[in-house]
Amino acid sequence: MWYKRKVKPQDIEKIREFCKTEFGVRVHITRYGGSSCLPEEKLIELDRREISTIQELYSMTFHELAHLYCYENNLFYIFHHDSLPDKEMALYMKKMGVRVEKFVDKKGKELMESFFPNIPFIGAYDDPKDVIWLKKWIKKNYPQAS
């Protein structure tokens, strides 16, 4: 399948232009820290280590766009605004982190299908190893819940 081919520089430029035109979002490529969305800045950071194929590039982009959608529509407000005191936020993340990320995957898939129905979406948390990684990340970044 064509979407399994390796990402080329022009593919990254294409996704940057798409995000800017359709969503008013900037896209930066990094090589550290993982992919993320900085909704206040309307910025998506994609970790190049996580996007080797076209399918991964688009799936990761739409996962992060879904975080922006949630932020702008106050879905899972606490998660997307980190709006509780430390201990309560840690407990919230421990309870809701995986659930929110799976919702974001679902919304990302819907968004991607509406723009690129010919590219199958890869959920960021479809693999149990990724769920385990997220739980460890939450434990590390919100130690007050331990």
Image: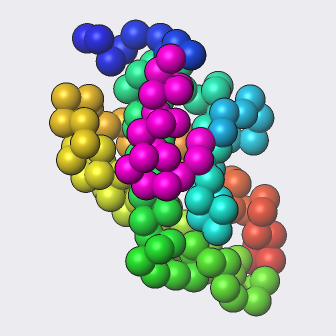
The answer to which image quadrant residue 70 occupies is bottom left
Q: Please indicate whether residue 140 sits to the left or right of residue 61 in the image.
A: right
- On the image, the x and y values in percent for residue 40 come to 64, 68
- On the image, the x and y values in percent for residue 103 come to 37, 63
- On the image, the x and y values in percent for residue 68 come to 49, 63
Quadrant in the picture for the N terminus = top left
Q: Write the residue at 29% across / 11% down.
A: 2
- On the image, the x and y values in percent for residue 79 come to 57, 75
Q: Please indicate whether residue 82 sits to the left or right of residue 118 in the image.
A: right
Q: Does the magenta-highlighted stretch encompass residue 15?
A: yes
The answer to which image quadrant residue 106 occupies is bottom left
**Residue farthest front in this picture:** 21
Question: Considering only vertical position in the picture, is 6 above or below 82?
Answer: above
Residue 123 visible: yes
Residue 125 visible: no
| Number of dots carrying numbers | 0
Question: Considering only vertical position in the picture, is 69 above or below 111?
Answer: below
Q: Write the residue at 41% across / 22% down.
A: 54
Question: Considering only vertical position in the picture, is 36 above or below 39?
Answer: above
Q: Which residues are magenta?
A: 10-27
State the colouring used for the structure image: rainbow
Quadrant in the picture for the C terminus = bottom right
Q: Write the residue at 36% across / 14% down.
A: 4
Q: Does the magenta-highlighted stretch encompass residue 67?
A: no
Question: Considering only vertical position in the picture, is 115 above or below 118?
Answer: below
Depth check: 44 or 104 in front?
44
Query: Which secondary structure class fits the magenta region best?
Result: helix
